[in-house]
C-alpha cells in the first residue's frame, strides 16, 4: 500500500481517482489547488503524486518547478491534463515529472503509470549516498568484494566515511588520501615501506602526498 497525493481542481476527477486507488489498496490524499498540495506534501510525505497541469491559482508545472528547486521532488510525479500541448508535457518531464497522462484517463493507463512510479520509488529508496568502512578495509576495485586488513594492535579501528554523491575527482582524492594515510600509519611513517606497499617511486609518492594534503608526520606521531 502506498500513500498517493491527487492534486486536481475538478471534484469529479479527484473523486474518481480516489475511488480507483482506494480499491487498489492505496491511501489517498486529495488537494484541489497548489496551496493544499504544498500542505499535503509536507504533512503526508506522499510516495507518489498525480498532479494536474491546469489549476486556477498555480499551475502544475510551476508547482513541479517549485518542488524541484526546493529539493522536495523526492517522489515520482505523474502529470495530468486534458488540454496540455506536447511542449508542456516535454517541459514537465525535463523538470522531473515521471510521466504524463492525458485526460480522460483510462483505468489501464492510470494503474500502469502508478505501478511503474511505485516500482521506481522502491528501487530508489535503499540507495544511500554514504559508504562507511573501517580504515584498512579497502575495496578491491572492480570485484565488489571488501578486503579486510586489520591493524595489528588492540586499538579500535577508526571509521572512514565517503560521500559518493560528488564529482569523481573529489571522491577519488578523498579515497586516495585515506588510502595513503592508512599505509603511513601501518608503516610508522616510513616513506620507503609505503612506497613498496603502494608500488610508487619515492619521488612520485612524496609528490602525490603533498598534492593530496597528507600530513607526513602523522604516521610517525601515531607510531
Image: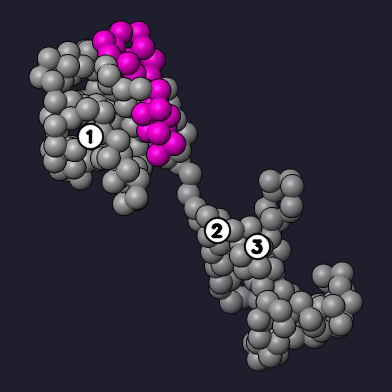
Task: Tell me the crowding category of disc 2: few under 14, some 14 to 19, or many 20 or more residues within 10 angstroms, Cα based.
Answer: few
Quadrant (top left, top right, bottom left, bottom right) of the C terminus: bottom right
Q: Is residue 60 left or right of residue 33?
A: right
Q: Dividing the picture into quarters, in which one does residue 133 lie?
A: bottom right
Magenta: main secondary structure equals helix
Q: Is residue 45 above or below residue 194?
A: above
Q: Is residue 22 left or right of residue 115?
A: left
User: Toward the viewer: 31 or 118?
Assistant: 31
Q: Which residue is mark 3?
A: 169
Q: Return the mark for residue 166.
A: 2
The reply to whether discs 3 and 2 touch (Cβ–Cβ < 8 Å) is no
Q: Marks 2/1: CA distance?
A: 34 Å
Secondary structure type for disc 2: loop
Q: Which residue is mark 1?
A: 59
Q: Is residue 33 left or right of residue 79?
A: left
Instruction: Decide if residue 26 is in sight here.
Output: yes
Q: Is residue 65 above or below residue 195?
A: above
User: Toward the viewer: 151 or 183?
Assistant: 183
Image location of residue 97, percent across then percent down: 38, 33
- First in sequence: mark 2 vs mark 1: 1
Q: Which residues are magenta?
A: 86-115
Task: Tell me the crowding category of disc 3: few under 14, some 14 to 19, or many 20 or more residues within 10 angstroms, Cα based.
Answer: few
Q: Which is more foreground, mark 1 or mark 3?
A: 1
Secondary structure type for disc 3: helix
Amino acid at each position: 500500500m502506498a500513500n498517493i497525493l491527487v492534486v486536481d481542481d475538478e471534484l469529479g476527477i479527484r473523486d474518481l481517482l480516489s475511488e480507483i486507488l482506494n480499491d487498489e489498496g492505496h491511501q489517498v490524499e486529495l488537494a484541489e489547488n497548489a496551496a493544499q498540495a504544498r500542505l499535503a506534501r509536507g504533512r503526508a510525505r506522499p510516495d507518489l503524486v498525480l498532479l494536474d497541469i491546469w489549476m486556477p491559482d498555480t499551475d502544475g508545472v510551476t508547482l513541479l518547478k517549485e518542488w524541484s528547486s526546493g529539493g522536495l521532488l523526492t517522489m515520482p510525479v505523474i502529470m495530468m491534463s486534458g488540454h496540455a500541448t506536447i511542449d508542456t508535457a516535454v517541459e514537465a518531464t525535463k523538470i522531473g515529472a515521471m510521466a504524463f497522462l492525458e485526460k480522460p484517463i483510462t483505468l489501464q493507463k492510470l494503474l500502469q503509470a502508478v505501478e511503474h512510479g511505485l516500482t521506481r520509488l522502491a528501487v530508489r529508496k535503499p540507495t544511500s549516498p554514504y559508504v562507511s568502512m573501517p580504515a584498512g578495509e579497502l575495496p578491491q576495485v572492480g570485484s565488489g568484494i571488501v578486503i579486510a586488513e586489520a591493524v595489528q594492535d588492540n586499538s579500535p579501528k577508526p571509521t572512514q566515511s565517503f560521500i559518493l554523491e560528488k564529482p569523481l575527482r573529489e571522491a577519488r582524492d578523498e579515497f586516495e588520501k585515506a588510502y595513503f594515510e592508512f599505509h603511513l600509519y601501518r608503516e610508522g611513517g616510513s616513506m620507503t615501506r609505503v612506497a613498496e606497499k603502494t608500488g610508487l617511486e619515492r619521488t612520485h609518492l612524496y609528490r602525490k602526498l603533498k598534492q593530496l594534503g597528507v600530513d607526513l608526520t602523522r604516521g610517525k606521531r601515531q607510531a
